[in-house]
Image: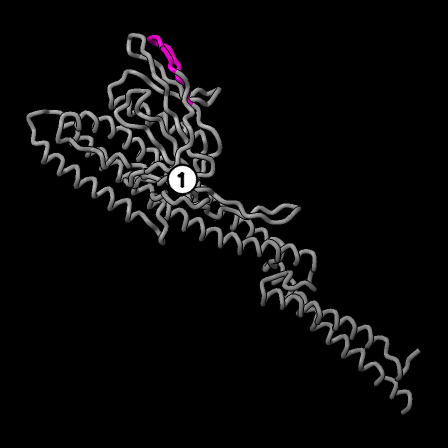
Amino acid sequence: MSSILTNNGAMVALQTLKSINSDMATTQSQISTGKNVASAKDNSAVWAISKVMEADVKGFQGISDSLNLGQSTVSVARQASETVTELLTDIKGKVVAAQEENVDREKIQTDIDALRDQIGAVVGAAQFNGLNLLSNTDKTAGSGNVNVLASLDRSSSGVAASDINVAKQDLGSGAATVGTMGTNTGGSNSAIADGATALAITFTGTPEAGNSYQVAAGGLTFSSAVEYVARDGDTLGDVTNKMVDALNEQAQVDELNVSFATNATTGQIEMTNNSGAGITVATADVFQSASGETDGTVGGGLANLTDINVTTQAGVDEALVRIEGLIQTSIDAAASFGSVQGRIETQSEFISGLTDALKSGIGTLVDADMEETSAKLQALQVQQQLGVQALSIANQAPQQLLSLFR
């Protein structure tokens, strides 16, 4: 049946043309934006995932900047530490030269003083953006460490930032001054046979910056007391190891044939008699800060540098012992910074690769396949032309009814 009121063919052709035009609009949007999912209405689930990933990419770009800043800061400190090591090695050469009696020790001392001043200049200038990792005498809690933002860790419970911890290394030459001391914690008189180990020294508690530790001169016949003031970040093990190094150094200075070491089981400092004969050690006057007292002045890692004086034979002998410990301190600092710098560089490379992988993943989710879209556009253009022609033909059908009424 034909009707001039209802044209079914035209309605079908019109709906088909509307569908083609809708697909055409979608395809043109994909071409203009380059995205298959440009908004939440295109695919809400995929769009939501892509936006979370884009936020992570933005965060990792900020982390990359943080790592670059941290790497530069640590690099400056490492370079300065290596320079200080070279200058200390030069000082050692001067000290060795001063061993010869037929030299002008006064002039050698002048050269040593100049090198010492240069070390101070290097340490003072070793800062980046106002941060100097070679200075660690501040007693403020947390001042001994610097955190470099390293990553964002996403889990089911949320997002957390992770850091790379950089421990400051002090290469200053400021002297330490012990503060208020507690009671004597030493033991009784002790007879030590040749080759035997005794005289256990024990420190207790959790160190705070400014806590003082001391082994007095009397009991061990040292020419001067051995002292250490804890810096921020020190553990009881760090304090014990520092005191062991200082005790061994003082024993060499005083030409005492004894050695000190930390007992791995008890954590105590033990002394071994290497003299070749039995010795008797008087009560070891061992002190540490009274409870809550943090009034000691934290010294620099190269504090003994100011004591080097080669104008006398005794000074030369002492300087030869002291310089070895100073060189080791600077080497340890450079090695520590080198290790951290390597870790930061590795993390920076990882973050760069991870950012690229995330961007690629986002592209896989939302980017349009341009080859497929181009082919689809050409097909839709043909369909659109055919749809227009079909609608035109359908609209002309009622015209045929006029011939029935002629």
Above or below, 43 relative to 158? below
**Quarter of the image where the N terminus is located:** bottom right
Q: 404 and 99: which one is in front?
A: 99
Any part of residue 375 in sight: no
Q: Is residue 248 left or right of residue 159?
A: left
Which residues lie in the magenta part? 189-201
Q: 252 and 169: which one is in front?
A: 252
- The image quadrant of residue 16 is bottom right
Any part of residue 95 in sight: yes
Q: Is residue 31 left or right of residue 6?
A: left
Percent across and percent down for residue 105 are 10, 31
Can residue 102 be found in the magenta stretch? no
- As drawn, the residue found furthest toward the right would be 1
- The image quadrant of residue 19 is bottom right
Percent across and percent down for residue 327 are 27, 32
Percent across and percent down for residue 256 are 27, 18
Q: Residue at x 35, y 9 (%)?
A: 195
Q: Residues within 10 Å of mark 1 (few under 14, many from 20)?
A: many
Q: Amino acid at mark 1?
A: Gly
Give the residue pinned by disc 1. Answer: 210
Q: 316 and 382: which one is in front?
A: 316
Q: Could you tell me which secondary element the residue under label 1 belongs to?
A: loop
Q: How many marks overall?
A: 1
Q: Residue at x 45, y 51 (%)?
A: 66
Q: Residue at x 35, y 35 (%)?
A: 335
Above or below, 84 relative to 216? below
Q: 385 and 254: which one is in front?
A: 254
- The image quadrant of residue 187 is top left
Percent across and percent down for residue 307 are 22, 34
Can residue 194 be found in the magenta stretch? yes
